[in-house]
Image (spheres, rainbow, N blue to C red):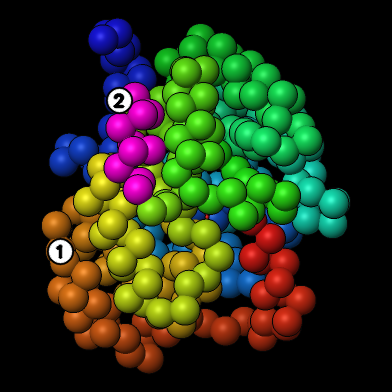
Amino acid sequence: MAIMSWGKQNRLHQIIKSDGHTVMLAIDHGYFMGPTHGMEIPARAIRPLLPYIDSLMLSPGILTTSVPATLGGVGWVLRASGGNTVLDPDIDNESLILTAAEAIRLNASAIAVSIYIGAEHQHQTLLNLSTAINDAAQYNLPVLGVTAVGKKMKEKVEKRYLALASRIAAEFGADIVKTYYCDGFEEVVAKTPVPIVVAGGPKLATYRDVLELTYRSIQAGAIGVDMGRNIWQSDYPAAILQGVRAIVHEKASVDQALELVEGLQNDSTRREELYVATAEDVAISSVH
Ligand code: 5RP
């Protein structure tokens, strides 16, 4: 196994804690979806959540406008690929939008690059990942490879496809892979020789569903979650986040975590409904 530089180890530790697990909060959706429901005003939406996360995954513009520069104890993973929007037929036509040097200037713990395996622009997105990894290597900056599915490959969330995509990200040199959970997820983990974090995907119907997704992911060998909509689109974001955290870091069962979440639901933890979601808002935020 390769010996990792001190700089990379330290940056990875800003994401993955001493127990080997991590709770990442994904709020990068605006880079192609704009002011996504629940994340219309990021500074307000994330404030109550910061005490319960290990790191944030976000775009550079939201970091510099919406996260206090005095923030301590939380790492950040900056989105480094993009260049498309939800208004395009698909969202896989991406390039690199952030250099490793700029990420270092922003004190990033890592950068995130999406690959769209099986989509029209898969080749280009794989080259994005490779370029970013070579660029980041100069600074001992870790790279999170994101196996994105976009619109076309959305139905492909099953183990053969996810193992293919995750393994390719690892083969290219990603330090962590972010992918989706599926039946037989142990196999995806076993075939991917770097740590895996699981995305939440579009909002699920119940808190139990979110906790079960988290529990099964951890049981199957994921090191944690990099979850977005199922946290900040829920009615009680800080409550569900603490339930997820209890499973990831405290080995809680689904029932124990659910009890915790239910006990934390009160007026002070209720999500501030700044804008009512229209049917279009809901549809847009489920495109991937
Ligand atoms: C977009 C992303 C998102 O960060 C990812 O989808 C995680 O968020 P969610 O839990 O809402 O799915 O990487 O490509």
Query: Which disc number belongs to residue 219?
Result: none
Residue plotted at (67% across, 81% down):
277
Disc 1 to disc 2, C-alpha distance? 28 Å
Task: Say whether residue 48 is magenta.
Answer: no
**Residue 283's spot in the image, x, y percent?**
71, 72
The image shows residue 163 at horizontal and vertical percentages of 45, 35
Q: Which residue is mark 2?
A: 10
What amino acid type should be assigned to the residue bearing mark 2?
Asn
- The amino acid marked with disc number 1 is Ala
Q: Which residue is mark 1?
A: 252
Q: Is residue 238 visible?
A: no
- Within-10-Å neighbours for mark 2: few <14, some 14–19, many 20+: some
- Disc 2 C-beta below 8 A from ligand 1: no
| SS assignment for the magenta stretch, majority | helix
Position above or below: 155 against 255:
above
Tell me which segment is drawn in magenta: 184-193
